[in-house]
Amino acid sequence: MREQLNKIRERAEAQLASLENMQELEDLRVQMLGKKGEITSILKQMGSLSAEERPKMGQLANEVRQNIEQLIKEKGQLLKQAEQQARLNAETLDVTLPGEAHAIGHKHPLSIVLDEVKDIFIGMGFQIATGPEVEWDYYNFEALNLPPDHPARDTQDTFYITEKMLLRTQTSPVQIRVMEKQAPPIRIIAPGRVYRSDAVDATHSPYFHQIEGLVVDEGITMGDLKGNLMQFAKRLYGDNTQLRFRPHHFPFTEPSCEVDVTCFKCGGKGCPMCKGEGWVEILGGGMVHPKVLQNGGVDAEKYSGYAFGIGLERLTMFRFNIDDMRLLFENDIRFLDQF
């Protein structure tokens, strides 16, 4: 038995020297030290020994086992180091090679113009206000002087969720919500997405973006509206830009107006973009109707205000000479890369 144990040790040492990977090392460990391994087989023969020989053979068997375990541990460390070095050699990079260019995203044209509009109005003392896109009929229509039977609702036919809840057709509801929560002076713009059941074509979409403005304070007049809009137009389109105010009617403003800007393409001389008129409509506005002020909790005897609404898509199309609104929503990389 002593001779068998010594042979097992010698064979283990010889085999360990020739091993090349961790799997071979594990196979050897099971062969020598496993439950059915060679050391275990020797120990099962201990019963046939005399009482005097048994302790000596047991001690020798343990020494052989410990010796083999130590050799396996040391060999394992050497194999791990060799595998790590081989992996490092295989993964070595030549840092002098040119790198691969990665495409970097950029702002959507709508975001470009929206950020410019925000910067202009923030520079004039306005704050940004937001509100829910799923809105109550009261805030979207009734509080804005559009009762259920008002004919102007027909032009803003929209998507109803219930009889009293809908997808907002304008960001004007934000104005009412701000007036309910904040006492004058108020000076805000409310950009956001709005919805109307329009057929999709070159100039219409069932959803688009509006930027509405509201100023409420003592002594606000139509002159304040004209002055701020003139400043806005010159900042956006250039110092030579002129505005034209035309009388109009909106249920939530009185008096009301539509505002045209000199065609930035032809400078007002007339071209296909402005249909030969030299002017392009960009927004509507006017003095806030006293009833709308009252619905917002504002004393219409003490305060007055003006409001306006701008279509972001219209501004963007004019700014970048885009003739089809659908291009802004199709996510065609060939189109978007131009910006």
Image (cartoon, rainbow, N blue to C red):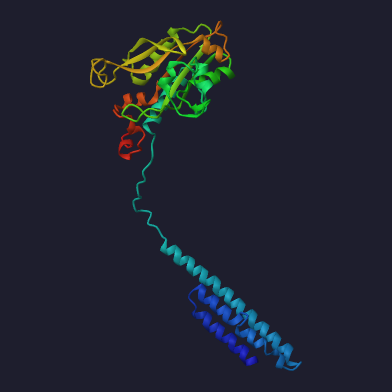
Q: Residue at x 26, y 17 (%)?
A: 267
Q: Is residue 47 above or below residue 151?
A: below
* Side of 282 where 53 appears, left or right: right
Q: Residue at x 67, y 85 (%)?
A: 61
Q: Nearer the viewer, residue 328 or 290?
A: 290
Residue 127 shows in the view: no
Residue 146 percent location from the top left of the image: 48, 16
Q: What is the quadrant of residue 158 in the picture? A: top left
Residue 98 shows in the view: yes
Residue 91 percent location from the top left of the image: 42, 61
* Side of 83 where 273 appears, left or right: left
Q: Nearer the viewer, residue 249 or 59?
A: 249
Residue 276 percent location from the top left of the image: 23, 16
Total labels drawn: 0
Residue 122 percent location from the top left of the image: 47, 21
Q: Is residue 237 above or below residue 94?
A: above
Q: Quadrant of the N terminus?
A: bottom right
Q: Quadrant of the C terminus?
A: top left
Q: Residue at x 52, y 82 (%)?
A: 15
Q: Is residue 187 above or below residue 73?
A: above
Q: Nearer the viewer, residue 204 or 267?
A: 204
* Side of 73 where 208 appears, left or right: left
